[in-house]
Amino acid sequence: MKRSVLTRYRAMAYITAVMLLVLCTCMVFKYGFGMGKDLTLVVSQIHGVLYIVYLIFAFDLGSKAKWPFGKLLWVLVAGTIPTAAFFVERTVVREVEPLLADRTPEPVKA
């Protein structure tokens, strides 16, 4: 497995988690204080698109790491639970790093 697969997943995990926290903050302002209705709409749509990209990258990583369905499902759902993606990402990196380290570098062809 290439390191870029893990890097893409990590970037999207952080971006999705941060956007979900921003969305939660916007919703508190919208429903708690009655302000920011338009901002909440925009942030929710941005988070939705980014979550779809996160799903694609997480599924790609899971299929290449040959995860069982339950683990893959947990990683996919982590993007919908505030702060969960931060913790799941750390666990995933710890488990996938050895798979990357076992790979022997190929000789450079001239």
Image (spheres, rainbow, N blue to C red):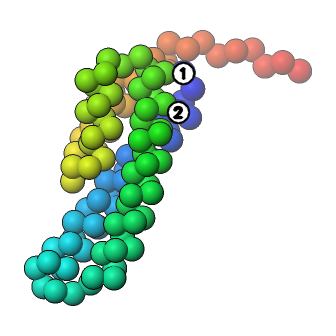
- The answer to which image quadrant residue 49 occupies is bottom left
Of the 4 image quadrants, the one containing the N terminus is top right
- The answer to which image quadrant residue 41 occupies is bottom left
* Residue 26, x across and y down, in percent: 24, 74
Secondary structure state at the residue bearing disc 2? helix
Residue type at mark 1 is Met
Secondary structure state at the residue bearing disc 1? loop
- Mark seen at residue 5: 2
Q: Residue at x 30, y 75 (%)?
A: 40
Name the foreground residue: 31 vs 108.
31
Name the foreground residue: 102 vs 61.
61
Q: How many labels, in total?
A: 2
Residue type at mark 2 is Val
Q: Decide: is 68 above or below 44.
A: above
**Hey, which residue is sitting farthest right in the picture?**
110
- The answer to which image quadrant residue 35 occupies is bottom left
Residue on which the image places disc 1:
1
Q: Decide: is 74 above or below 55.
A: above
- Image side of residue 52 versus residue 35, left or right: right
* Residue 56, x across and y down, in percent: 47, 39
Q: Residue at x 33, y 82 (%)?
A: 38
